[in-house]
Image (tube, coloured by chain):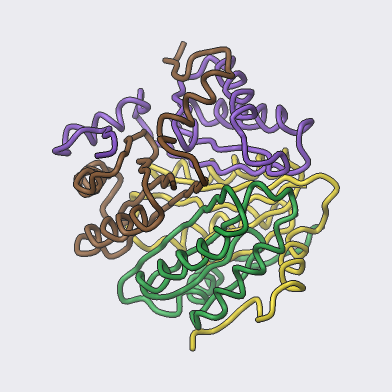
Chain colours: A yellow, B green, C purple, D brown
Amino acid sequence: MTLMELSMYPIDKGESLSKYVAKLLDVINASGLAYTLGPMGTVIEGEWDEVVALLTRCHETLTPLSNRIIANVKFDSRKDAVNRLDGKVNSVKEKMKGPTRHQAD
Amino acid sequence: MTLMELSMYPIDKGESLSKYVAKLLDVINASGLAYTLGPMGTVIEGEWDEVVALLTRCHETLTPLSNRIIANVKFDSRKDAVNRLDGKVNSVKEKMKGPTRHQAD
Amino acid sequence: MTLMELSMYPIDKGESLSKYVAKLLDVINASGLAYTLGPMGTVIEGEWDEVVALLTRCHETLTPLSNRIIANVKFDSRKDAVNRLDGKVNSVKEKMKGPTRHQAD
Amino acid sequence: MTLMELSMYPIDKGESLSKYVAKLLDVINASGLAYTLGPMGTVIEGEWDEVVALLTRCHETLTPLSNRIIANVKFDSRKDAVNRLDGKVNSVKEKMKGPTRHQAD
């Protein structure tokens, strides 16, 4: 299975990007794949061909709206590993002392 | 304020990395900065100098343990914006139709 | 046209990765697309579908060799722009005072 | 020694970014560190503290000019390795069949 972290946005539309990210999230949600939205990107879990096909659909969604699109994508493919969206966080959680999330002091 | 997404790991220690990520999370937790652990990286919020000092502490933590360390770091600095760890996700959430998180079908 | 910067490697094969990068470069070279190898990744220029198909071929090349593959990929798609592999560097070169490359003092 | 690949830019200034990249290259050149400008980022070689100090100077250069700055930074730290800016490319070159650079067919 592959985890794909996607951060894709137009750079000719000013500093507020949430409108474009929301459009992509609707495309990601329609795929049926597992995903989680974070503050710096969305992580999606699927077979390689599924996540790459979704990457292309995201690019096609922004293409009519922007002249220049940037995407930063990280892939992590591991054999014989499933449910890694939760599994990776849980595996770290077991080994650390503090919480996985902390509000500022 | 700056959001820093950190993914740092040794590449000479085999495929299981959660032990090293947990060590870094303990360092991140000790900083007192707001953070959230995700499946592909940890996002930390602070002033530029705070997050960069933390990046260096993370690197110093792994240096005695590994011969080769890789880090992928994304920064997003925005003036007059605070509590962006939750704020960015909430801003997208308001504009999208589906949920911010979805288990596989 | 799209520029794709690709950095893909196994993380279960120890710290020396050049053997695997060389295999991917042979796959990239066979594509006929323009590319340039740099110290932190290879940049390839082509239509979106061409560069993404090449990304998949690179992943297929490493899959039989490794249990866990990491890829960091940056895309930059700009309409009505061609020959950007040289063009982007030249555009910066015209505006800067020093050289585009410098050996350590 | 550490290789740092830096891609830093404002996202509130429209799609043409070479003016800002050129400003950063002047800052990088003034550092005296070895660097090479590529189509998707600039790679700088130095000790960890040197490259991170330079990262901060780059951020300080853009801060007065933009309301929102994005940076994507990759680090590769390897003990007992020097002149890696050329060394990494040469190490791959020896093992591959084709050239390290190719114009489109």
Question: In the rendered image of this protein, does residue B29 appear above or below residue A7?
Answer: below
Question: In the rendered image of this protein, does residue B33 appear above or below residue A77?
Answer: below
Q: In the current view of this chain or complex, which residue is farthest to the front?
A: D80
* Residue occupying the point 56% across, 65% down: B61
Q: Residue D5 versus residue D21: which sits nearer the camera?
A: D5
Q: Is residue B79 left or right of residue A45?
A: left
Q: Residue D61 versus residue D13: which sits nearer the camera?
A: D61
Instruction: Look at the image and tell me in which quarter the C terminus of chain B lies.
Output: bottom right
* Residue occupying the point 62% across, 52% down: B10
Q: Is residue C16 left or right of residue A7?
A: right
* Residue occupying the point 59% across, 61% down: B41
Q: Residue B65 versus residue A71: which sits nearer the camera?
A: B65
Residue C34 lies, in percent from the top left, at: 46, 20
Q: In the current view of this chain or complex, which residue is farthest to the right?
A: A80
Residue B101 lies, in percent from the top left, at: 68, 67
- Is residue C95 visible from the viewing direction of this image? yes
- Is residue A67 visible from the viewing direction of this image? no
Residue C45 sits in quarter: top left
Residue B96 lies, in percent from the top left, at: 57, 65
Residue C98 lies, in percent from the top left, at: 17, 37
Q: In the current view of this chain or complex, which residue is farthest to the bottom?
A: A105
Instruction: Look at the image and tell me in which quarter the N terminus of chain B lies.
Output: bottom left
Question: In the rendered image of this protein, does residue C88 appear above or below residue B99?
Answer: above
Give the number of marks: 0
Residue C52 sits in quarter: top right
Q: In the current view of this chain or complex, which residue is farthest to the top?
A: D105
Q: Is residue A60 left or right of residue D21?
A: right
Question: In the rendered image of this protein, does residue C23 appear above or below residue A40?
Answer: above
* Residue occupying the point 48% across, 76% down: B87
